[in-house]
Amino acid sequence: QVPLVESGGGLVQAGGSLRLSCAASGRTFNNYGMGWFRQAPGKEREFVAAIRWISYYADSVKGRFAISRDNAKNTVYLQMNSLKPEDTAVYYCAASTKLSTRRDEYDYWGQGTQVTVSS
């Protein structure tokens, strides 16, 4: 088990920034690829970014979002800049034994944090 707890969501105006955090429990955090996904109302959960030794991004966030991790703190971050109304969604942190962009390859999920971007 890898319990995950997200924080940092909120309401922000278009063009603004937010930083999401995901704190993991357990001693094996270093062994996991960590990902961020998001789900907007009425839409499927979609990949945003992932990191292990390298990082991947969805095209829709490339150049605006940055994923990072602090293994000493068992925490992964998602820095979101130049936010757009279409970024509004519940953002989920997830852990995988792989570095993957596929939702079905993630074994552990957080409860999600709401991000709302107003126009």
Image (cartoon, rainbow, N blue to C red):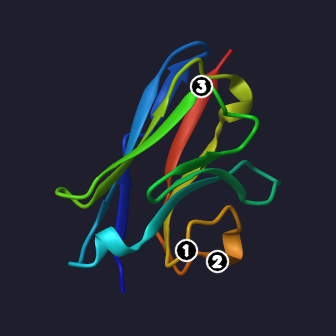
Residue contact at pointers 1 and 2, CB within 8 angstroms: yes
User: For residue 83, what is the image quadrant?
Assistant: top right
Question: To which residue does mark 3 refer?
Answer: 64
Residue contact at pointers 3 and 2, CB within 8 angstroms: no
Q: Is residue 59 above or below residue 52?
A: above
Residue 52 seen in the current view: yes
Residue 110 seen in the current view: no
Between disc 3 and disc 2, whose residue precedes?
Answer: 3
Point out the residue furthest to the front here: 53
Q: Nearer the viewer, mark 1 or mark 2?
A: 1
Image disc number at residue 105: 2
User: For residue 22, what is the image quadrant?
Assistant: bottom left
User: Which residue is at 25% across, 58% downward?
Assistant: 71
User: Which residue is at 42% across, 72% downward?
Assistant: 32
User: Which residue is at 68% across, 69% downward?
Assistant: 103
Q: CA distance from mark 1 to mark 2?
A: 7 Å
Question: To which residue does mark 1 refer?
Answer: 98
Residue 113's x, y, as percent?
48, 50
Q: Residues within 10 Å of mark 1 (few under 14, many from 20)?
A: some
Quick one: SS at disc 3? loop
Quick one: SS at disc 1? loop
Quadrant of the image containing the N terminus? bottom left
Q: CA distance from mark 3 to mark 2?
A: 25 Å
Quick one: SS at disc 2? helix
Point out the residue furthest to the bottom here: 1
Residue contact at pointers 3 and 1, CB within 8 angstroms: no
Q: Amino acid at mark 3?
A: Arg
| Viewer-side residue, 80 vs 57 | 57
Q: Amino acid at mark 1?
A: Lys
